Image (spheres, coloured by chain):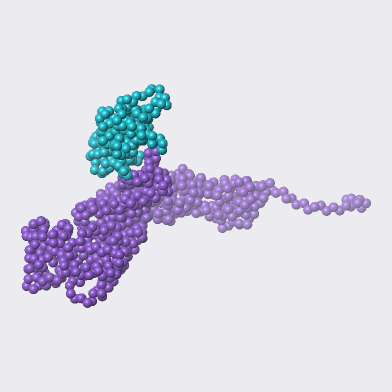
Amino acid sequence: MRRSANRRTVLQKSIGLNSSSATSDPYRSGRSVSKEMENIEILFGNYADISSGDIEPAGIESLCSDISISHTDVRMLLLAWKTKAKRQGYFSQYEWCRGLKALRADTLAKLKKALSDLEKEVRSPQNFLDFYSYAFRYCLADIQKNIDLETACELLNIVLASQFPSQTKKLIEFIKFQHEYKVINMDQWTGFLRFCNEINFPSLDNYDSTLAWPLILDNFVEWMLERQN
Amino acid sequence: MSGPQRKNLFKIEPFKQRVELDPNYSDKAWKILEHAIHEIYSHNASGLSFEELYRNAYHMVLHKYGEKLYNGLVCSMTCHLREISKCIEAAYGVLFLEELNRKWVDHNKALQMIRDILMYMDRTYVPTSQKKTVHDLGLKLWRDIIIHSRNIQIRLLDTLLDLIYKERTGEVINRGLMRNVTKMLSDLGISVYQDDFEKTFLDASSSFYCGESQKFIECCDCGQYLIKAEKRLTEEIERVSHYLSSSSEEKITNVVEKEMIANHMQRLVHMDNSGLVNMLIHDKYDDLGRMYSLFRRVSGGLVTIRDVMTFHLRETGKQLVMDSEKLRDPVEFVQRLLDERDKHDTIITQAFNNDKTFQNALNSSFEYFINLNNRSPEFISLFVDDKLRKGLKGVNEEDVEMVLDKVMMLFRYLQEKDVFEKYHKQHLAKRLLAGKTVSDDAERSLILKLKTECGYQFTSKLEGMFTDMKTSQDTMQGFYASQISDSGVGPTLVVHVLTTGSWPAQPSIPCNLPAEILGVCEKFKAYYLGTHTGRRLSWQTNMGSADLKATFGKGQKHELNVSTYQMCVLMLFNTSEQLTYTEIEQATEIPPQDLKRCLQSLACVKGKHVLHKNPMSKEIAEDDKFYFNDNFSSKFYKVKIGTVAAQKESEPEKQETRQKVEEDRKPQIEAAIVRIMKSRRVLEHNNIVLEVTKQLQSRFLPNPVVIKKRIESLIEREFLERDKNDRKLYRYLA
């Protein structure tokens, strides 16, 4: 309780401070850690909404323009993943500090660099699966279990296109073409990644429909083969 | 001689008889016996003394001359048989066999006598020295000397085969003689019969029938050929019973079967204009029966018939159910199916020995083609509807049962039983509400049959419908009893109170009822809700009917039997002469599609056009005008307008019903998946599909894609999950 009370006072003081004054110490003494923490909190204060105490969509927008990244850039999604943000378009102070501390970024410049590094780091299969599923959950509103097709396609473009450009392109084309499904659920979402990882593309010669793929992928493969002939 | 002083010892010498035999005794005795054998063979046995001969033989054996005796016998018999052999060889033509037979009889007689004489030798010498008994020796010598003699062996065989050939080609032969000769061969040992006769006989028969079947098949049609084959077969069996060893029966029938049937099976079955298909089409029970009994004798024979029958059934069935011309009248369509089944059922009972495997083939064929047309369930229900409305009027109970049983048989073939049930429920509802059921007993009997097939769940709702009808009657009586005060005024109302859920759900927007009706409706509502608190009543104006008394020009009166919708429309013309379509629609608020249909039946049916339409066309347009037809006339007092009888559904209606069925299937499939997964915990995708199909096939055949969809839905709702490692596996989440 005391700690959080302290933090609140620090936060209130820090408003209005110039973020550029925060520098990092490469040797990270105990003092510098707390210094880093302080800087992160100062950064949070710069973007947080005063009344709610969270960073809200408006704050994110100004953050994006400050580090000159589009808000639809995969790096913003990576930031959300790292902070384990629960709600799309919002960061709580706890999430923010957890994320930036893990990234060891207490300045905007470091943050931008860290996000670019993260883009490489996330390519390891285990990390990517985690990130990929997180991206889906992040887009769910409230108690929903599905995301609508438009969001799904955009999300695919953001998270999957860099690794599997041709698959993503075709998949999005198919999703827009078909009328059977109006939403995409988690099972189908993870199915897409698994499909990209396992199936030869575009020959699809190792696709076995008896392997219990989600039906939407059966349809996708059928559609692909039809168009190939 | 000797003096008296000599002690005279009297000695009694033992009686010494010379037992020593005459050294020539054995020769003498054999001479006697040999002579006797000679006499026997010369038919001169009457002068012989059995006692003397037996004694001599006995002594010879006793005095260890057994071997001499035996060898002598062999020698002498051989000698005699050689003589006989010459006699037989000298006989020609028909006489040859006769001579052979006569000598054989003689030889047997002689052998009998010799055996009697030498009985002691047979008993003692033969067993100890392991020789053949006299009788066996006689047979062996006969075989070696006569039968296997170079001049006789071939001739005998040729003669026998020649005679059999003659008989086969229609000549009469001496069967007695044949029997004796083959009997002789068998007596000489089964191997003699087989080696010296049977083998060659079978070969000769084989080539005979091979040739003959070729000849027949070129010039006969299938039926004739089968008659010939059957005749040949019985002939051969007869031949065996007359003069061959019974052991030959199976072998010779095998030959005939192979040559005449097995080798030509395919060709026979597929013969143009006379093969199996032709027989089936023309109900040739005799030919079919013959084919069955002949073909069943050879391996693969019945399979051949069955396969061709199945193929034929499937093809004709396919045409039956796919021909759009024949689909126009559902009742006829089903009648045709029933006729087809009856026809083949009769064939199987009459000609195919009521063979179970054929019945199964028949059933599987029907199952195959009935389900090719997805309207079959609807049509079968329409057929039932037709029968229960009018078809069974005045038919006795047994025949009603028979018709219903046949329908149930078709029902069993259906893969989509749930679709039939859906239609049946709809049609039953219409029958009950229109009061058009011929017999309650027949209805109940059908429900009972469905209950045994589909279980309690389905029929409980149907039974609920009957209960509603009964309760409604009582309610109406109660209602009118309470309304005595103002009886005789206003229309008579008959209400059926239907329990929601028991009856097929009909989306219903109640139309605007005429004021006269509305009043009495409100009264009923008040009465009903007064007696049954907490219930809700809503009017199903799309299901009712009305009898209207109408007065036309020239004071002509008629009673019009119309639907509720039609009544609403007609009542409007009490107050106005002319109305447009739009006006009618606004006044009644009947759904456009129903309104169009009901106007069509009021204005466009010849002889029943109570209304005039302008312009006079079949189709109803928005700005059409309608007039009351004052000149309406009819021969009948009662005029029935617009039938509410169940008809074949239109394309959109069909789609709708199908969609409803699909919707109803979803929970059933999901329940099956959950049931299976609950007990198995972890299961492969394909196995789930398999088991679900198995569980549900008595109701319908679930589509694997639909099953997959249901699985995915259950994954989404977290009843199941995919296994992390093996993608084929699902896990049950408890």
For image coordinates 33% across by 37% down, the residue present is A92
In this orientation, which residue lies closer to the viewer: B342 or B483?
B483
Provide residue B711's location: percent of width, then percent of height: 34, 45
The answer to whether residue B328 is above or below residue A69 is below
Colour of chain B in the image: purple
Q: Is residue B501 left or right of residue B491?
A: right
Left or right side of B53 for A82: left
**Residue A11 vertical position relative to residue B189 in the rendered view, above or below:** above
Residue B298, position as x, y percentages in the image: 38, 49
* Residue B532 appearing in the image: yes
Residue at the top extreme of this rendering: A26
Which of A91/B411 is in front? A91
* In the image, farthest residue toward the right: B5
Give coordinates of residue B497: x percent, y percent: 27, 66
> What residue is shown at x 27% (from left), y 67% (from top)?
B529
The residue closer to the viewer here, B545 or B118, is B545
Quadrant in the picture for residue A30: top left
Q: Quadrant of residue B585?
A: bottom left
Chain in cyan?
A: A
The mark total stands at 0
Point 27% across, 56% down: residue? B377
Q: Nearer the viewer, residue B544 or B701?
A: B544
State whether residue B365 appears in this view.
no
Q: Is residue B320 left or right of residue B10?
A: left
Residue A112 x, y percent position in the rendering: 30, 27
Say which residue appears at 35% left-offset and 61% top-offset.
B451
